[in-house]
Image (spheres, coloured by chain):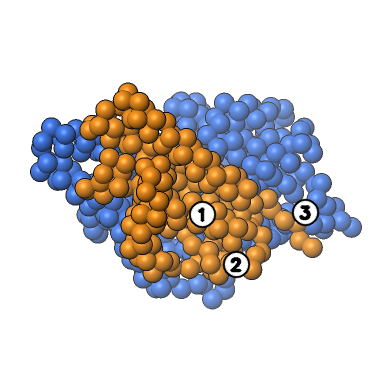
Amino acid sequence: MTYQIADEPVETSLRSYVVRPGMPLLASMFAGAWLAWPWFAFNAIAMGSPTRRKEIALCAAAFAGTAALGATVIALFDAGVLPDGAPLRLAVLGVVTFKLAISYHIAAVQSRTFHVYEYYGGPVRNPGRLLGAAYLLRGLVIGLVDHPLWVIIVAGGLPRWHAGPWGW
Amino acid sequence: MEPRQIAVLLEQAEVQRRLGNHRGATELAQRALTLDPDHARSHAALAAILLDARRLAGAGIEARAALALDADDRYIHRVAAAVLAAERKLDDAWAHCLIALDGPAPAPEAFVLGARLRELAGDRAHARELLHEALAIDAAHVGALTQLARLELAGGARDEAARLIALALEADPANPGAHLAAGAIDLARGDAASAEVHARFVLAVDATDRDALALWAAVQARRSWLLGVWWRWTMWMSQRDDRRQIALLIGAFVVVRIAIIVTDELGLATVARILHLGWLGLCAYTWFAPALFRRMIARSLETVRLDPDF
């Protein structure tokens, strides 16, 4: 039994599904949070990350925080405090900024373990096809529920050019 | 039997660390800790190796474990100071460094570390003074000569830096740190070919050495302005911790998005569209440039051959 260093990932049966943390981050921008945050959580488990609990907690906090901020923006809009146009778009931008910031943070935390994982020769999958499919599917996922809060939570970090008031 | 075995393992680990073989050094320190998980010096040695391998989280845990087991060992304080410096906790690092320097006959390495901390605090004169103290103990101390050479280079004295690094390489021709400093000096003097030789030397020992890869990449960046721009941006960003990097990127995103929203609301749709496309172009560039860079380095590394005696 060799001494285990605290930052070393543990062996898992899901190692062949590990991707670079930059991939879920890219997914958060181009596909949406519906894919990115669960993917970050899965990647932490697959990698056997010693900080996986923290990473999963951050993913849960990302969903909860976005929901809380989104609900606040919608409530202010419904109450007439936040008028349509630039003020509403700027408020939604605030939520998008939160989503991007927390996604970057999760990616930064996961990268520390990933470097060690890669250092010991852990396999890394190229998820190009999955990313492409997710980009094409994002409209379908976002259209599953016809409510602005759903759109705010699951839409991507980079708004479309002709984005509606809720960022899609 | 065990203490002797542990001492031999740690000695071998230190030799491997100095050679830049982090993986081999880590395994040796791990073997020492397998024999005795409460051996403070083994924890400290492992922390020093992990720090060299840029595994900061592991280094921090090991350094704290060593301090908890033995708070009187000056070597452990020196390692703790180095780890804290990497964590950018400079005041705490300096406090541990002072303990490492306290008492009779401090190790030259403690002066070298102290010099690095003073340099990070912006006090180059004090840093130079500490390095001369290290050289007064050991005139051929490679770490002190290398650090002094880097200090002179930062101050613009390239010839003096070249003279000092030549002395360091004379004292230890296989020292990776001295080779990397020599490469940086050559690059500053416009001799990219010579800098590449130094990077190759270190990569032949460890093809994953990040500092050597950084030097190699800096040489390649001189050959392509498009990648050179990305490289300078990366170097500028890498001087900041994760939080600052994220804050800068998010800040830039927010500024551009606000500009797009405001111009769009003002009826300047064309300007808004140009800003939007420009931002997407920048995102694509920052995504593809490192991929191109990695491919270029991977292709170059195929020509690196290990020394048959390695």
Chain letter of mark 3 equals: B
Say which mark, if any, is on residue B33. 3
List the residue tagged with mark 1: A38
Residue B305 rendering spot, x and y as whole percentages: 46, 73
Tell me the orange chain: A
Q: Quadrant of the C terminus of chain B?
A: bottom right
Say which mark, if any, is on residue A25. none
Say which mark, if any, is on residue A14. 2
The residue lying toward the viewer, choosing from A158 and A2, is A158
Q: Amino acid at mark 3?
A: Leu
Q: Amino acid at mark 2?
A: Leu
Residue placed at 16% from the left, 41% from the top? B272
Chain letter of mark 2 equals: A
Tell me the blue chain: B
The residue lying toward the viewer, choosing from A6 and B280, is B280
Visible residue check, residue B248: no
Residue B300 quadrant: bottom left
Residue placed at 32% from the left, 23% from the top? A81
Residue B75 rendering spot, x and y as whole percentages: 70, 39
